Image (cartoon, rainbow, N blue to C red):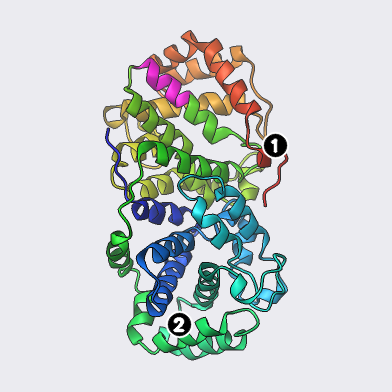
């Protein structure tokens, strides 16, 4: 299994996870990246600067991804009426130590700073990083777009709203630049044309020659696992635990070292689609309603549709997203049966069930080892889990339990303190 992934290929897909709602996907980050790219081209930034800018724009709201309330607030244009800085700081904290994405941390940290210096950072004017100033303008323009209104009817009001904040919230020179290229009808039509973005990403593939290795992807997946697990106070280490357990079981089945690393990625990202589930459903202590359970079932679908877009992720997408499919074909969301369910997906399913049963959940305390084994053996008998993998698990149960204990002890500090930015 060879990995040679262009960063834009990975980031454009993962940025989709930041757009998830129970009504589907929006395109806020993609549109913000497009606007930022047009500004950068117009002012003559070089390829390296444009690359960092576009990558930061694709992930600029990463600090808000775990909280539905924050995500909704960010779509309010009236910036004086809300606190929009905590998610920028949270994004900075998520990325600042990343060898692959650390260069995006500062631009993201300051992407809502006021030009006139009224922001908590204390920065003003050109002391605010240029990339942050560009993303700020692009982000607020995108928030003003209304999908149900013809774009040329909106254009005057959008530009007027931007002008009113020039010199206070926005860099006045960048506002002038925007008004210059905003005369192009093609800019607005590209912005609202969902089919154009394939061309946009294809055209910016030329940025740099850097490629991500499998170890790079693991490190980035760790960041997204932190985001995913912050959606509920009961899942502080769930994705990491599933990742470690899935890798452990893959080794037991004789997977190669590269395949085990791929399994780690699948485990880290298996619940990526949970960013589409409202926090109150994930934390509900009682029985879910039929509608709430249907909402939960979306998460594996979105995990698959996001990961399948990444070149080289064909197997990882299946391993990650099919963890609620069952041998009897009654699982979800694709209703895949035994003949089509690969061993890797079965491994992630067993890992997910084992971790879930041994975790604290809103509706129950962790199960005892004997109870866990009884439940999982019963699932094998009912053709929900693969018996050979469950047998491997319980033949090494003490090792598996020790791995879970270590994962719990090494949970991210933000999770230990339940501080979500």
Q: Quadrant of residue 48?
A: bottom left
Q: Nearer the viewer, residue 307 or 204?
A: 204
- Who's the residue at 48% across and 66% down the image? 28
Q: Quadrant of residue 42?
A: bottom left
Crowding around mark 1 (Cα neighbors within 10 Å: few <14, some 14 to 19, many 20+) is: some
Q: Nearer the viewer, residue 85 or 194?
A: 85
Instruction: Specify the principal SS of the magenta part.
Output: helix
- Who's the residue at 36% across and 44% down the image? 212
Q: Quadrant of residue 169?
A: bottom right
| Residue 264 x/y as whole percent | 43, 31
Residue 135 in sight here: yes
- Who's the residue at 37% across and 52% down the image? 7
- Who's the residue at 71% across and 68% down the image? 122
| Vertical comparison of 377 with 124: above or below | above
Q: Is residue 385 magenta?
A: no
Q: Nearer the viewer, mark 2 or mark 1?
A: 1
| Residue 375 x/y as whole percent | 54, 19
Whichever of callouts 2 and 1 sits on the residue coming sooner in the sequence is 2
- What is the spatial separation of the Cα atoms under label 2 and label 1, in whole angstroms? 45 Å
Q: Which residues are magenta?
A: 245-253
60 lies left or right of 252: right
Q: Which residue is mark 1?
A: 416
List the single residue furthest toward the top. 395
109 lies left or right of 386: right
Mark 2 element type: loop
- Report the quarter where the N terminus lies: top left
Q: Which residue is mark 2?
A: 149
**Disc 2 + disc 1, Cβ < 8 Å:** no
């Amino acid at each position: 299994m060879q990995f040679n992934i262009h960063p834009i290929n990975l980031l454009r897909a993962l940025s989709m996870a930041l757009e998830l709602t129970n009504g589907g996907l929006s395109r806020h980050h993609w549109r913000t990246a497009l606007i930022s790219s047009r500004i950068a081209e117009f002012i003559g930034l070089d390829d390296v600067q444009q690359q960092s800018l576009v990558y930061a724009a694709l992930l600029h709201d990463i600090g808000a991804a775990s909280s539905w309330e924050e995500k909704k607030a960010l779509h309010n244009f009236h910036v004086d009426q809300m606190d929009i800085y905590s998610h920028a700081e949270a994004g900075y904290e998520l990325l600042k130590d990343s060898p692959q994405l650390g260069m995006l941390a500062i631009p993201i940290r300051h992407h809502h700073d006021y030009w006139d210096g009224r922001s908590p950072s204390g920065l003003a004017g050109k002391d605010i990083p240029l990339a942050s100033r560009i993303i700020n303008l692009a982000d607020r323009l995108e928030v003003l777009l209304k999908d149900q209104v013809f774009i040329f009817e909106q254009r005057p009001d959008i530009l007027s709203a931007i002008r009113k904040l020039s010199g206070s919230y926005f860099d006045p020179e960048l506002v002038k630049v925007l008004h210059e290229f905003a005369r192009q009808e093609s800019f607005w039509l590209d912005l609202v044309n969902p089919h154009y973005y394939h061309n946009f990403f294809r055209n910016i593939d030329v940025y740099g020659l850097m490629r991500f290795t499998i170890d790079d992807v693991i490190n980035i997946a760790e960041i997204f696992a932190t985001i995913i697990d912050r959606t509920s106070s009961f899942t502080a280490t769930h994705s990491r635990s599933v990742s470690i357990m899935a890798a452990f079981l893959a080794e037991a089945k004789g997977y190669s070292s590269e395949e085990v690393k791929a399994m780690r990625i699948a485990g880290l990202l298996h619940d990526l689609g949970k960013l589409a589930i409202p926090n109150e459903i994930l934390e509900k202590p009682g029985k879910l309603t039929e509608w709430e359970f249907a909402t939960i079932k979306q998460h594996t679908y979105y995990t698959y549709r996001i990961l399948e877009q990444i070149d080289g992720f064909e197997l990882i997408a299946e391993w990650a997203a099919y963890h609620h499919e069952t041998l009897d074909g009654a699982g979800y969301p694709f209703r895949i049966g035994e003949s089509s369910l690969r061993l890797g997906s079965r491994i992630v399913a067993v890992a997910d069930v084992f971790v879930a049963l041994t975790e604290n959940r809103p509706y129950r305390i962790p199960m005892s080892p004997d109870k866990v084994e009884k439940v999982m053996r019963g699932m094998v008998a009912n053709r929900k889990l693969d018996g050979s993998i469950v047998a491997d698990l319980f033949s090494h149960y003490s090792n598996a339990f020790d791995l879970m204990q270590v994962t719990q002890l090494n949970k991210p500090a933000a999770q230990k303190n339940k501080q979500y930015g």
